[in-house]
Structures are given as C-alpha cells and as structure tokens.
Image (spheres, rainbow, N blue to C red):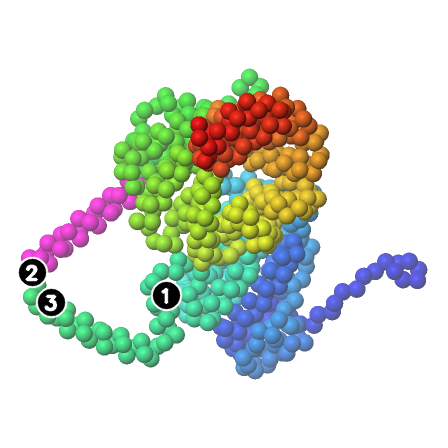
Amino acid sequence: QTASDQPYYTMELIRGKTLDRWLQEADASGALQLNQYLRLFQTLCTAIQYAHQRGVIHRDLKPANVMISDESGVSSSVASGTHSSTSAATWQSSIKILDFGLARLTDADPNLATLAIETDKVKGTLAYMSPEQASGGSNVLDNSNALGNSDVLDTRSDVYALGVILYQILTRRLPHDIRGLQMHEAIRTICEDPAPRPVSQDRQIPIDLQTICLKTLEKDPARRYQSAAALADDIERFMADEPILARPPGATYHLRKFIARHKVPCVFATTLLITLIAFAAYAMIQSANMRYERDLARTAQHVAESERDNARTAEEQTRAVKDILQKMLASPDPDLEGREVRVIDILDAAVAHLNESDDQPPVVRAAVQLTLGDTYCALGLYDQSEPLIESALELFTRALGPDSAEALSATNNLAVLYQDQGKVAQAADMFQTVLDIRRRTMDPDHLNLLTSINNYALVLQELGKYDEAETLFREALEARRRVLGPEHKDTLVSLNNLAGILVALKNYAEAEPLCRETLEKQRVILGEEHPDTLASINDLAVVLSRQGKNAEAAQMYRQSLEGYRKTLGPEHLDTLITTFNLTRLLRDTGQLDDALTLSEELVEAAERSLPAGSWYTAHFHGMNGQVHIALKHYESAETAYLKWYAGVRSGLGETHPYTISALRSLVKLYEAWQKPDLATQYRVLLPGKKK
C-alpha cells in the first residue's frame, strides 16, 4: 500500500517475445535446428509439470502465453540469424509462462471448483483446448464417454494443449482449422475429428516425433501422456535415438533403434547377411515348382477374402450391439407416473427388452448381456449381474471357443463378480484359468495379460497366499511401468497393490513410502474423490495404524469413508471395508462407544447389500463381536462370533487364516465368559488338535 493506503502489486518485468512471434522470427532466420526447438519444448513441459505437482492446472496454454526472454540471449540470436547449439540450461532461463487467470487448484474445495467450471463454460482459447475442456457445459457431444464433463478436468487437459503447441512447432499449423466455424461446429471438430498427421504437412518430420505428437492429442485423456513430465521424457528418448514409449516396444522397433545407433557395423553385418540369404534364396527358387507358386497364390487370395469377411462380421456385430443397447437404454419414459428414471430402472428395462427378443445372433446377445451384467456388478447388484455374465460366458464359449478373447473377458468379469460376492475359491480358479491361457497366447507385455496377473494376485492375497501374490504384484508393476509409464493409472494401481501385500507381510517400512507415492500421484492425476484415490487414502491409513500412527490414520480413514459415501454410496463394498477399518482403529484406541455404533451400522448395511453367505459379511460380524467383547457384552459377542466363524469357514475353507482366527477368537470368548466346556468344544477344531 502507498502512504495514502492505495493498494498495488508488483510483477516481474519480462523483456522478450511471445512464442508465436519468436517462431516467426526463427523461421525467417533459419538459425535453429529441430533438436533446439525440442529443447525449448521440453523446458515448457518441465515448467508445466512444476505447476501440476503443486496442484495448479493452467487451462489456457498457448504460444501467446509463453515468452522467450531476451535476457538469455536466445531470442536475440534467433533474430540476428546467429547459429548456436542452444543448451537446455539456456532454454530454462529463457522460458516464462504467463496468464494463469483460468488456472484451477486441483486440491481446492471440489464444490467450489465444480461451480467455477460450470459458470465459466468454455472460457479460454478454443484452438488449444482439450476435448473435455472445449465441450464443458455444451450439448455438442452426444457421447456416452462424457468427454464434456468438465467436473473431471485434470492435468491431462494441459498435456493436450502442450500437444497443440508441439504440433504448431513441427508444422507451423494448428491441428484443427476452426477459423470461420460456428462455436458448436468448432467444438465438434475438436472433440471428434482426428488431427491430420504432421507428416502430411511436412514429410521431413520423423515418424517417432509424429507418434509422440499424436499421442499427446488423443481425444480420450486416458490415452494421452499422463503427465507433462512423461511427455518431456519421451522427447528426450527421441533425441537420444532411444525407443519411445508412445508405441508398444516390439522387437522390430527396438532393432531399428539399435541399428540407428550402430550404423557402420550393422551395415556391414546386414550386407553380409543379405548376400548369404540371396544365395540361399536363389538356390531354393531354382528348385521351386511353378504349380506350388500357383497354389500359394490361391491360398493367399482365400486368406485375404476370409479376413475381409471376418472384419466385416466383427463390424456388423459391433454395430448390432450398439443399436440394441441404444434402443434398450432409450426405452424408459422419464415422465412415467411422475417418477425420475434411475439407473436401475434403465437396466431393468433393458434386461426385460433383451429377454423378450430372441432374434439376435448369439455373439451379439452375449455382448449385450456382458455389458448389462458388468453395469449391475459395478452398482453392487450382484444377484442381477450373475445370471447375465454367466449366460454371456456360455454363449461366447459355445460360439467362439473357451480360448477366444470374448470368452476370456467374460470369464475374467465373472471371476471379479465372484470375488466381490465372497466366493473367493471359485474366483481364484477362474482367474488362474484366464491367466494361464493369456500367458500361452499373448505377448508378455499385452495389457490384458497384465490385468490377469494383477487380478490373480489380488485373489491369492485374499486366500492368504501372500508370497505368491507378492511375486505377481511385482511382475505386474514392473511390466506396467515399462509399457504404460510410471504415472499411468494402472501403474499406480499396481504400486498400491504391492504396498497392500507388503502390509499383509508386515513390511511396513517399504509399504508406507509406496502408499504415499501412489496417493500423491493419484491426487494430481485422478482427483481427490476418484475411487482409486480414496482406496489409496484407505490403504495409507492401514499402514499408519499398523505402525501406531493412530491420529493420522483416523483422519485418513474418515476422509476416505466420507469420499466413498459420497461417490459410491453407503452400502458399496469399498465403503463397508473402510467402515470396518475405522471401527477397528476406534476399538484399538479405546473409543468403544463410537466403535460400537459404527460396527452395528456396518453389519446392518452388509446384511442388506451383500449376498447371503458372503465372507465379507461374516468378517464384519467378527468386528462387531470384538467391540462387544471389549465392552464385556458376552452374549452379543457370541452371536456375532458364531456368524463370523460359520461365514468364513463356508466362504474360505477350514484352513484359511481368517477361519483359524475366527475359531481362536471364539475359544477366547468362551474362556473370558468362563464357559470352559464350550471353549474346549471349539479348541479341538484348531489345527494340530485332535477332534
């Protein structure tokens, strides 16, 4: 404030040029090479990553908001046409990012953040907006993927804008020419039309660099680079002539990169090899029969025709599934009897429609059933889900075979359903079957195979086979880091799962930093209320409570529980598990009244929402019994413990650690209650005891 109380603020004075003007001068001078443009772009990515790590999304990145400072000497050297090998350090001192007027804090109050987005609509510079930002608040897209839902806008929107800038650096054009278009048509173009390949603008652009650029411009945020740092790292790999991560790293691709780095010896070896192959081929060709060649040509023609027919059939099936689902999901009347249509109403109507019609091909019918069954399962409606997925699996197996991709997908989804129902042994057998087939038929880095490794490890953990589970979790994590990158959501899931098994093995020193790393990345990439983020909060709380850090653990349990109740509902399995964990902590810290209230709510919700015989429900009864024992309510504890023991024995078997734990707890209850006969009756059932 001035002496007269007039408020003012000061800002840094930057002398230089905006990036768009700087590019024009660079073109005119011809002073810089491609690698120098890429160094500048890397520095821009690094600056954006710095903002993202501190919870800030820019939301209006464009060349006009990037300045090249004169103080570094870079700008002046370009203007004068001086050729130099500009260093990364020089670029770092020259880049300035301006105008954070539309920036958003990712860790701000989510209600306020949502309001700001909905009010802002499509503020910003449209040509540089990601599809999810451009369509926010408009009805341009009729898209079930909801790209226009700007409530979920995250750092990957800035990654898209970086892709537009990279495209402009490479081609001096924008990926989408929206000049003269109406607003709705411009948004549709950004959201739906693919960007022209950079090589169509300039054939000198390397293919790897084009691949990097197009990955950054993917419409689906999940298919882009998951951070600005990952984009900068792939640019670095390109400049070092190393394999980039923007494509599956096949053996042929790695070989081509090796040859590029070792040209002279490879040329010599290749020449010698070609000479030998040519000599052998000449000898074979001379002895070949003309009729064999004619037959071979006919065979190739038949194969090509068969492949065309198969592709046409697959396309027709996909179109048929889409048409059927659209008809089904459009059938409920929102105004019927004054009711609001719920998701369950739509699903029930769709199933009824499917049951009334029998004119679909088996594979199409199976695909529709699998889609509906998976949706029921995601809502926790297991009784409705099970017959649909089982029927889909039967149809796929009969029509395409048990090893087909469709049958394996249905088998995997049915195993997930069984696991959620507490049928852990059945789920384990099905996960193992899928994993064995995929190991035999797929590339070691195939994403479906990595999913199977992760799923089978999870069910092994539930079965108490911790060492086997740890080995598989480490295998899945290593592969996903290599194939998807360290910040992909699936990589973070594997990181979190490894931490979970380390907790089961009581290796808390290694588990805690893994949990914190996972949570930090998920908060930035997925947001505070994403189910994966909430799971990571819960898992970190488990690690903290096991180490006696109870105050921080309780705070994180409550945060996770509040998020689950808001996003998944009070009776979802993840909500119930978090309630169980918080109850246990309250019991261990002597807050017994609060623990009793939570445990009673827990078993009531589980009885309502989980299927009969679920071992999860049994486990929740066990916690309720432990709280009653702490309060010396022995009769209530006995009722809960008997349900606990019967449930885990039925669901997991007599030798599972959970079953043994329930049995030992029952014996201790009767000893504390001074009922020695009942204690003896159950003690003899423990391992090593004679009946």
Looking at the image, which is closer to me, 151 or 201? 151
What's the residue type where badge 3 is placed? Met
On screen, 283 above or below 628?
below
On screen, 25 above or below 611?
below
Quarter of the view holding residue 633? top right
> Mark 2 against mark 3, which lies toward the viewer?
3
Of label 3 and label 1, which has the lower sequence position?
Answer: 1
Residue under circle 1? Answer: 254
Quarter of the view holding residue 3? bottom right
Residue 557 lies within the magenta run: no
Residue 508, x across and y down, in percent: 58, 51
Question: Marks 2 and 1, Cα distance to the nearest angstrom?
Answer: 38 Å
Residues rendered magenta in the picture: 289-314
What's the residue type where badge 1 is placed? His
Residue 464, x across and y down, in percent: 47, 41
**Is residue 134 visible to the viewer in this orientation of the structure?**
no
For the point 59% across and 23% down, which residue is it?
Answer: 675
Question: Marks 3 and 1, Cα distance to the nearest angstrom?
Answer: 31 Å
The residue most toward the top is: 337
Q: Main secondary structure of the magenta part?
A: helix
What's the residue type where badge 2 is placed? Met
Instruction: Tell me the tag on residue 625.
Output: none
Instruction: Tell me the tag on residue 290.
Output: 2
Of label 2 and label 1, which has the lower sequence position?
Answer: 1
Residue 292, x across and y down, in percent: 8, 57
Residue 313, x across and y down, in percent: 28, 40
Residue under circle 3? Answer: 284
Q: Secondary structure at mark 3?
A: helix
Q: Secondary structure at mark 2?
A: helix
